[in-house]
Image (cartoon, grey):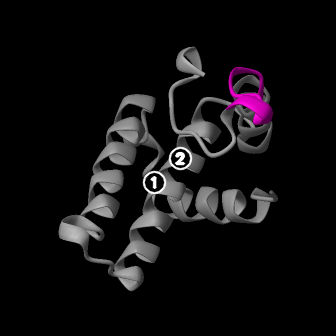
Amino acid sequence: MSDEIAREALRAFVRERDWEQFHTPENLAKSISIEAAELLECFQWGGENLVAAKDELADVLTYCLLLADRLGLDPQAIVLEKLEQTRSKYPAEKARGRSEKYDRL
């Protein structure tokens, strides 16, 4: 998972437009939620619009990367850390093929 090129491109894009002032953690978190809803809309009613989904997913990831950057967090590190936490909650031998929450395994 290498996102440094994307992160640098995003930083430059934002800097060129002087948008840092608008990128508070709260605003970025709101934008993630809004874009995630737009992504969900691509699959509404059982449909599947992959072209639109690709664009919306890019928007979600963009705001996630911007928020991580704003908070001084390394996206790769926090994803891997969370994966380890989730791995202990959902051991493969108990969770394989099941969708129950960890406290019901």
Query: Which quadrant does the N terminus fall into?
Result: bottom right
Question: Disc 2 versus disc 1: distance between alpha carbons?
Answer: 19 Å
Mark 2 in CB contact with mark 1 (< 8 angstroms): no
Query: Which quadrant does the C terminus fall into?
Result: top right
**Label 1: which secondary element:** loop
- Residue 37 x, y percent position in the rendering: 28, 53
Q: Does residue 56 appear to the left or right of 87 in the view shown?
A: left
- Residue 38 x, y percent position in the rendering: 27, 61
Q: Does residue 80 appear to the left or right of 55 in the view shown?
A: right
How crowded pointer 1 is (Cα within 10 Å; few <14, some 14-19, many 20+) is rated as: few
Q: Quadrant of residue 53?
A: bottom left
Q: Does residue 48 appear to the left or right of 21 in the view shown?
A: left
Q: Which residues are magenta?
A: 87-94
Badge count: 2
Camera-nearest label, 2 or 1: 2
Q: Amino acid at mark 2?
A: Cys
The residue at the far bottom in this view is 51
Q: Does residue 5 appear to the left or right of 47 in the view shown?
A: right
Q: Which residue is mark 2?
A: 64
Residue drawn at x 71%, y 59% as measured from the top left:
8
Q: Amino acid at mark 1?
A: Asp
Residue drawn at x 41%, y 81% as measured from the top left:
50
Residue drawn at x 33%, y 81% as measured from the top left:
49
Main secondary structure of the magenta stretch: helix
Vertical arrangement, residue 76 with respect to residue 18, above or below: above
Q: Which mark is residue 77?
A: none
Q: Which residue is mark 1?
A: 18
